Amino acid sequence: MRLTFAALSCGYGRTPVLTDLSFTLRRGLWLITGPNGSGKSTLMRCAVGLLPPIAGRLLWDGADAYRLAERYRWHLGYAPQETGGSPDMPVRAYLHYLAALKGILPARRAARVNEVITIASLTEVADRPVPDLSGGLQQRMGLAQALLNDPDLLLLDEPAVSLDPEERVRFRQLLLDLSADRIVLTATNLPDELDGMASGIIRLSSGRAILTEA
Amino acid sequence: MRPTELERADAIARDMAEPMDAADLAAILNRLDDFSPAAPLTPPGALIERLRGRLPAPSRQRFREDGLSASPLATTLQFMLAQVWLFRPVWWGATTVATLIGLALTKWVGATPGLLVPPLVAFSLAYSMREAGTPAWEVELSCPVRPYQVVLARALVVLGWMTVLGAIAGSILHFIDGWQIATLGDWLAGMLLFAGASLLGMVCTGPRLGAALVLAGWVALGIRAISSTAPLHLWVLPNTTAALLGAACLAGALLMAPRFGKSVHQEG
């Protein structure tokens, strides 16, 4: 598995926020860092395919990810930075719904939903409506849904920002475990927390990216 | 007391240091048999189990290797069916109650029940796209589905339920007033026309603005209808033309569905 940014420029409309991104990510944990407003979330949206490239290409194992469309998204799990907008339904029901969208076989759905609920420590709130959850719990739910299809490419936008210290420690270990057999790309403005664990750090500044591999 | 292995070995060594003939040597070799290793008492299966823990762990099997559907058709069907879950009981209840109240009102003013359709359709489609422009919407679009599938699946749920409500309204009027089932035509034509217009408006301008534009159009048509002396029919077009125009708008909305993400970003 390989995700390549090939001279990729992306942004909103025809106005690029990030230009000429050129690097390749392989299995491991990769961090995106940069000050607020540097384009971390934009890079995430480009990697998901929500924003089409203005120039250049995004390649998944050498094929154009934007053209692959749902065949590319079949490989990925994405947790956006912000939460909200989730339908007024219990956590478990919402995860069931997203499991169906991700193509999880009906016979395996219930078990998988329970599994990610356990991984994200959501057991106690599994039957509460999603909009009633606190910011931290909603963020954990974001992680849970991103893990549903056991993705090859896990994209997490500021995943630990609302977690309490104990959860952060557990979360670090989880990221490390997950990155053993997939690409984990996570945006963070707290790189120190994950430093030393990462395969590389992508630093964003003035619309450009510099990748430093470990 | 039996001599230890070490003592017996020492004794053999001492005996071998002495001059010996062939018979002595044969006797010593027989005594050496005591030192041959005994077959283990542990059954081989149990031994393998004990050793297995010392072997490198086999690589963990990924859930996605056998937990995901490989068929795009099956995935699409699952996705379409799952859309029904997004429509919460409050929507099913509210549209039913609105239809029954509206039915009484339209009967009171002598209007066609089709008058109820535009607000029901516009409200329902806006409700079906209520998370558009939010992070939850981004999560859905990160799944292996296409924007037109999202629009189509939700429109089908709305149109299906609106058809059921129309059939219920028509049946009630048929039993109360002996209305012709053909009045359902008004309902279906209005449903298609306003659903098409709503969806096209939503795809081009975003869900909230699209629904608002259609509702504004409905209000304008309503004022025009009320101020005229003609029987209170809402449509300015014959039913067939309205239905065909609505179907064309629906098709256009599906073709333009990839724009939906853009309009959502603009609106959100």
Image (tube, rainbow, N blue to C red):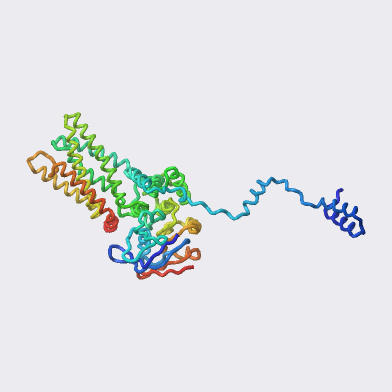
Question: What is the quadrant of residue A188 in the picture?
Answer: bottom left
Seen at 73% across and 48% down, the residue is B40
Q: How many marks?
A: 0
For the residue pair B12 and A54, the one nearer the viewer reads as: B12
Q: Residue at x 30, y 62 (%)?
A: A12
Query: Is A68 in front, or is B116?
Result: A68
Q: In the image, residue B150 lies at what x, y percent?
A: 31, 49
Toward which corner of the image does residue A58 lie, by quadrant? bottom left
Residue, far left = B229
> Percent x, y for residue B136?
35, 52
Residue B78 position by quadrant = top left
Say left or right for A190 vs B87.
Answer: right
Q: Is residue B148 left or right of residue A111?
A: left
The correct choice, above or below, for B230 with respect to B60 in the image is: above
Above or below for B174 versus A152: above
Is residue A165 among the parts visible in the rendering?
no
